[in-house]
Every structure is written in structure tokens, then in C-alpha cells.
Amino acid sequence: MSQIINAIANATRDLLRLKIIWIMVWPILTASLLWVFIGWLFWDFFAEFIFLGFAELGVKDWLDNQAPGWLAYSLQWLINIIFFIPLVIVTTLIITAIFSMPALIHHVAKRRYPHLKRESGGTITGSLVNALYATFMYILIWTLTLPLWAFGAGIIVPFIAAAFLNQQLFRYDALSEHATHTEIKKLLASNRFPLWTLGLLTGFLQYVPVVNFFAPVLTALAFIHYELARLEKDRAQAIRETGNDVA
């Protein structure tokens, strides 16, 4: 657990650096503009879908009778915002994982792990496939767990989904530049629970107002710190074991 706390603490300190600020800003700005454009393009469709939902739930007539027009449209805007925020966060996470990770890895490795040899065991194809798989499974988790909301247990779904998405998106890329292909497979297959724990802790931040603005890059940095520390420790242990065998 101490390694996880150290990773988050080091990631938090990195956020204060000027270079990281731009890396943090442009993905969330891009994601926000993307979903604003999509919302504007399909506004009529979304509005019709929401009002159909009101009708199915039997509240449309009640809303019209209580406060004709403005209350229903206010709820429509609220629902759009409720969906807009997580969509922006998830899109920002994906953009960060695909486009910003090399710069973040370079920053962390240069400052914290300057002697860690780069083996480039990961590939761009591997990163893209991993991102697509993570996104697909994230959507699937939400889809399959929708019935839980009817029983009140749905409140846990966002955190489980965020934990999965975070650890799946960033664990591979965090190692891709420094670990060999064999090291990547070994490290990703071991200690899965801490990876999920780190994913869950950083996932909580995505639902905290204001803090969620920093969450995507903080999550990426935390996984980089955590995985590079594990890689360094694993290589040091391998050297010790080799020395003992020779002795």
C-alpha cells in the first residue's frame, strides 16, 4: 500500500510543474470541445430521447402541470450536464493514454529513474489495442450493471468502472518504453490487486468537483511512478539473484 501512496504523492507533486500543466490542459480542452460539438449536432435527438424517458416514467404530464415548459427543460439541461462530465473525463483519459503518455513518461523517468534502461518492449499497436479494449469493457460494465440502479446498488458502478478503466488504460503504457516484452507480461500478470486499488483511488478523484479536472493526468502520472518503481525493483532483484547463483 505504501508504494501506491508514494505513487500518488509523487504524481501530485509533478502536477505543480509548468510543463505538466499544458499536458493536463489540452486533453480535457479537446475532449470538452468534442462533446460540446456532438451535443450541439445531436441536440434535438438527445432532447427527444430525454422527453421520451420522461413519458415512459410517467412524469412528463406531472412536470407540465407543475411548471409548464421551464422545469422539464431545466431537467433536460441537468441530465445533459450529468452525462457530459463523465463523457469528458473518460475521453480525456483515453486521449491522455494514447497521446500524452510519452511526454509524461519522459518527465518522470528523467527526474526519478534516470538510470533505468529503456528496452521499448511496448508498441503503438499494443497501446491502441489496449485503449480500445479498455473503452469497450468500460462501456460493457456500464451496460451490464444498469439493472443494479433499480436496487440502489448502482452507486458502486461508477467506481468499479473507473477502477477498471484506469488500471487497464495506463498499466501497459507506463511500462512500454522501459520494460522488455517479457517484463511487461510478467509485471502485468503479477500483483493485480494493487493495480486495481490504484485504479480505484484515482477513480474516486474523477467524481470530486474541480479535482476531476486534474484527475486524468494525475492518474497517468501515478501509474507511471508505480510501474517504473516496480520495474526498477524487479530488475534489482534479478541482479541479486544472478549474483547469488554465480556465488
Image (cartoon, helix red, strand yellow):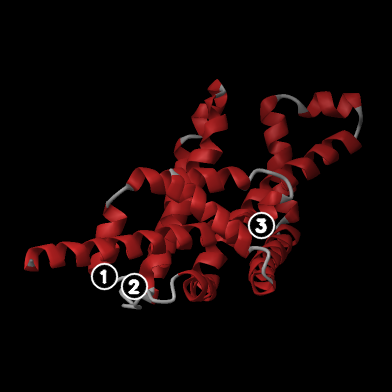
Residue nearest the viewer, comparing 57 with 224: 224
Residue at x-position 44% and y-position 71%: 113
**Three-letter code for the amino acid on which mark 2 is drawn:** Gly
Please report whichever mark, 1 or 2, sits nearer to the chain's N-terminal start.
2
Considering only vertical position in the picture, is 6 above or below 34?
above
Considering only vertical position in the picture, is 141 above or below 182?
above
Horizontal relation, residue 120 to residue 169: left or right: left
Instruction: Identify the mark at residue 217; answer none if there is no mark.
Output: none
Label 3 crowding class (10 Å Cα cut-off): few <14, some 14-19, many 20+? some
Horizontal relation, residue 170 to residue 116: left or right: right
Q: Residue 211 at x, y = what percent?
A: 69, 50
Instruction: Identify the mark at residue 214; answer none if there is no mark.
Output: 3
Q: Residue 245 at x, y = what percent?
A: 8, 64
Residue nearest the viewer, comparing 150 with 105: 105
| Disc 2 target residue | 122
- Let me know if residue 33 appears in the view: yes
- Let me know if residue 84 appears in the view: no
Residue at x-position 48% and y-position 69%: 112
Q: Residue 200 at x, y = what percent?
A: 50, 43
SS class, disc 1:
helix
**Three-letter code for the amino acid on which mark 1 is drawn:** His
Residue nearest the viewer, comparing 158 with 205: 205
Considering only vertical position in the picture, is 188 above or below 149?
below
Instruction: Identify the mark at residue 181; answer none if there is no mark.
Output: 1
Please report whichever mark, 3 or 2, sits nearer to the chain's N-terminal start.
2
- Contact flag, marks 1 and 2 (Cβ < 8 Å): yes
Residue at x-position 68% and y-position 43%: 208
Which quadrant is home to the N terminus? top left
**Three-letter code for the amino acid on which mark 3 is drawn:** Phe
Which quadrant is home to the C terminus? bottom left
SS class, disc 2:
loop
